[in-house]
């Protein structure tokens, strides 16, 4: 039959004319008969043959067959026949059939509505008492079996018309399954196939469908098809299939999961729940890709569905759960999702879910009324593991190209520069800036101590013609902050300041390109000296980070690494307020305010008191550093937490100095110079 139809079409002289063989096929409902035989599997194996025949006819016959009712109806039946039984023997043929349909829809987006309608067309037309017809532009051939049809001959090729009115027995079919089995549900079913190539082809077909450019087709896809609910329902099912006891380290290690390659690329040791985790992350990556490629109408609807069904209804209760294991796993999974997220629409929904939609400056006594406030509280949790995992979440969030992230967490509290003292002259020395005489750590005995000549606050800095503190002064302030007795990097190779400059330069360039579209100012707004001082609060996020930083000598090594990593990410942002507040040691702080540098100065003061209580401190510190670098076997030492904290503190100060150095050159050509040696510029 196929060969005859193709040969006949090639012999036709008039383009688009239906030949007698095609008319016979349609008049006598040959496709309906084949569909019935395929459903009954009579003879055995017939279903496979029917799928293949339909695919070849639709692909090879150029005449627009899908416009005819006697083709449209068996196509709908065949769609309901496929994709319903998991592990079906005809999955390969089914996915080929859907591929042909999707390619036809891509060529003519107007077909999408009629292919997806399925049985819903019956009840709608029946209730309106109108004859059910397919697209007006369709060529129709009169069916002699239905003499009651009086459809005019509208065929462009002059063929005999066939009524597009549904027969009476069709109208009497129940509509209980309306919209439940059509092209979308068939594709979703095939996407769940255990055969990787079948699932991949089905996913590509669905991707082709949602990227149809027609606004009307996209709107129908959202409003009148199960596309978005079906995709998100499968995503939620896979999320709930992930074991709740997964180790956050295992979740973080499973990187590079792609919907085109669901399993992890590396052949590392497996762990319980790895397959379920890979399946979820693979489908989430596919959803993200769908939203990226889909028509804007479909993308927005699908992103909102993911936010509502997955983020709000499933993930949020787990994040707020009393069970620490539930909080731990859900936070790590959310971090993995953020790491894979690329589509702007889904990123917008994720940011709104995590941070809210209206960023406002917070007050110190605000309770944790929002999810963001709860998550910030988790960063200072009694469980160090929860704190580390939640800090990783925020670090991942800070790397996303969405301005509201940095505005909500930091900038909304720094605007107005209320951390700067107003109406007072510039201090003559840096001691006045930090009010060190009021700090219990900075007593006369402390400042005159022979333990740390390099830690004494530097003299008043030099300034450039534009008023900016010279980069040499800032870099030296951070490099000389840790006293010589607490430094160990000079005794080891490849631990110097130059390495940090190289790394910071790459990270700063990446961050600058990400924030370039946001139009940030080049410098801070000048202060009005007559403006009265207002209370300043750094915000819950910075307060948490500063509090954590102030306890660096008492916290576990892994937690200290994560805190300093988040602060480094923040310091890289090229906003003048962030740079001033986090990287300028010489700002004239308002009473009661603290900056990152002032927090570090107080940590150094605490360190100098503790050093005197640790015998053989330099030797033990060097040993701990070698242990952390894997140069000597690890062994438990007294004051190990303190010693590890000192190592992190030294490296963090070098990192901040490097960030300050690479951020300054764009502001003036006179600052382009080679990297300074450690402790000197």
Image (spheres, grey):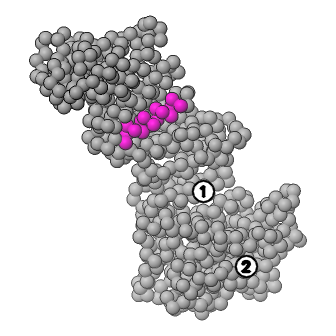
Name the quarter where the N terminus is drawn: top left
Residue 157: x and y in percent read 17, 27
Relative depth, front residue between 91 and 618: 91
Q: Residue at x 57, y 36 (%)?
A: 279
Q: CA distance from mark 1 to mark 2?
A: 30 Å
Q: Which residue is mark 1?
A: 391
Name the quarter where the C terminus is drawn: bottom right
Disc number placed over residue 140 in the picture, else none: none
Q: Secondary structure at mark 1?
A: helix
Secondary structure mostly seen in the magenta stretch = helix
Q: Tell me if 257 is positioned left or right of 166 in this view.
A: right
Q: Which residue is mark 2?
A: 678
Magenta span includes 402: no
Q: Earlier in the sequence, mark 1 or mark 2?
A: 1
The residue segment tinted magenta is: 197-211
Q: Residue at x 46, y 77 (%)?
A: 522
Residue 147: x and y in percent read 13, 11
Vertical position of residue 498 compared to residue 66: above or below = below
Residue 5: quadrant of the picture = top left
Q: Tell me if 521 is positioned left or right of 593 in this view.
A: left
């Amino acid at each position: 039959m196929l060969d005859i139809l193709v040969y006949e079409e090639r012999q036709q002289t008039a383009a688009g004319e239906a030949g007698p063989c095609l008319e016979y096929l349609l008049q006598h409902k040959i496709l309906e008969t084949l569909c019935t035989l395929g459903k009954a599997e009579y003879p055995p194996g017939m279903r496979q043959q029917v799928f293949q025949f339909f695919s070849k006819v639709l692909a090879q016959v150029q005449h627009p067959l899908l416009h005819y009712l006697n083709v449209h109806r068996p196509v709908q039946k065949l769609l309901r026949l496929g994709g319903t039984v998991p592990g079906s023997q005809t999955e390969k043929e089914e996915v080929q059939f859907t591929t042909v349909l999707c390619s036809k829809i891509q060529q003519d987006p107007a077909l999408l509505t009629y292919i997806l309608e399925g049985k819903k067309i019956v009840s709608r037309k029946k209730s309106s008492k109108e004859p059910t017809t397919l697209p007006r532009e369709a060529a129709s051939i009169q069916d002699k079996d239905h003499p009651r049809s009086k459809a005019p001959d509208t065929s462009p090729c002059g063929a005999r018309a066939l009524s597009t009115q549904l027969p009476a027995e069709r109208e009497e079919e129940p509509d209980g399954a309306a919209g439940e089995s059509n092209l979308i549900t068939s594709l979703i079913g095939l996407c769940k196939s255990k055969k990787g190539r079948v699932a991949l082809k089905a996913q590509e077909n669905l991707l082709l469908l949602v990227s149809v450019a027609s606004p009307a087709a996209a709107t129908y896809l959202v409003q009148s098809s199960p596309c978005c609910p079906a995709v998100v329902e499968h995503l939620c099912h896979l999320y709930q299939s992930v074991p709740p006891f997964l180790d956050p380290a295992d979740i973080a290690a499973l990187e590079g999961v792609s919907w085109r390659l669901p399993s992890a690329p590396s052949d590392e040791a497996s762990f319980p729940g790895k397959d379920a985790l890979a399946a979820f992350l693979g489908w989430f990556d596919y959803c993200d890709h769908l939203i990226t490629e889909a028509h804007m109408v479909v993308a927005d609807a699908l992103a909102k569905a993911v936010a509502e069904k997955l983020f709000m209804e499933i993930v949020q209760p787990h994040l707020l759960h009393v069970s620490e294991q539930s909080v731990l796993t859900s936070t790590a999974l959310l971090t993995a999702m953020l790491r894979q997220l690329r589509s702007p629409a889904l990123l917008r929904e994720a940011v709104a879910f995590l941070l809210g939609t209206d960023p406002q400056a917070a007050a110190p006594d605000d309770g944790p009324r929002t999810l963001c406030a709860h998550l910030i509280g988790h960063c200072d949790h009694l469980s160090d593991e929860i704190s580390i995992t939640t800090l990783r979440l925020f670090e991942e969030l800070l790397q996303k190209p969405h301005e509201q992230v940095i505005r909500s967490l930091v900038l909304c509290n720094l605007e107005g520069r209320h951390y700067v003292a107003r109406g007072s002259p510039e201090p003559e020395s840096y001691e006045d800036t930090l009010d060190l005489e009021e700090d219990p750590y900075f007593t006369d005995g402390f400042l005159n101590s022979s333990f740390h000549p390099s830690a004494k606050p530097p003299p008043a800095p030099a300034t450039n013609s534009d008023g900016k503190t010279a980069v040499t002064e800032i870099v030296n302030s951070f490099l000389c902050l840790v006293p010589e007795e607490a430094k160990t990097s000079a005794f080891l190779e490849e631990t110097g300041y130059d390495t940090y400059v190289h790394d910071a330069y790459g990270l700063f360039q990446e961050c600058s390109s990400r924030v370039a579209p946001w139009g940030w100012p080049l410098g801070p707004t000048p202060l009005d000296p007559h403006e009265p001082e207002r209370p300043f609060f750094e915000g819950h996020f910075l307060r948490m980070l500063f509090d954590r930083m102030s306890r660096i000598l008492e916290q576990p090594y892994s937690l200290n690494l994560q805190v300093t990593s988040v602060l480094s990410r923040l310091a890289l942002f090229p906003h003048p307020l962030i740079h001033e507040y986090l990287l300028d040691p010489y700002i004239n702080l308002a009473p009661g305010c603290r900056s990152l540098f002032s927090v570090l100065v107080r940590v150094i003061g605490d360190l100098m008191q503790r050093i005197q209580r640790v015998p053989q401190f330099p030797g033990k510190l060097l040993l701990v550093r070698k242990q952390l670098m894997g140069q000597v076997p690890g062994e438990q030492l007294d004051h190990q937490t303190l010693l590890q904290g000192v190592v992190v503190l030294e490296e963090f100060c070098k990192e901040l100095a490097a960030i300050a150095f690479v951020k300054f050159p764009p502001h003036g050509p006179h600052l382009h110079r080679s990297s300074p040696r450690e402790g000197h510029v």
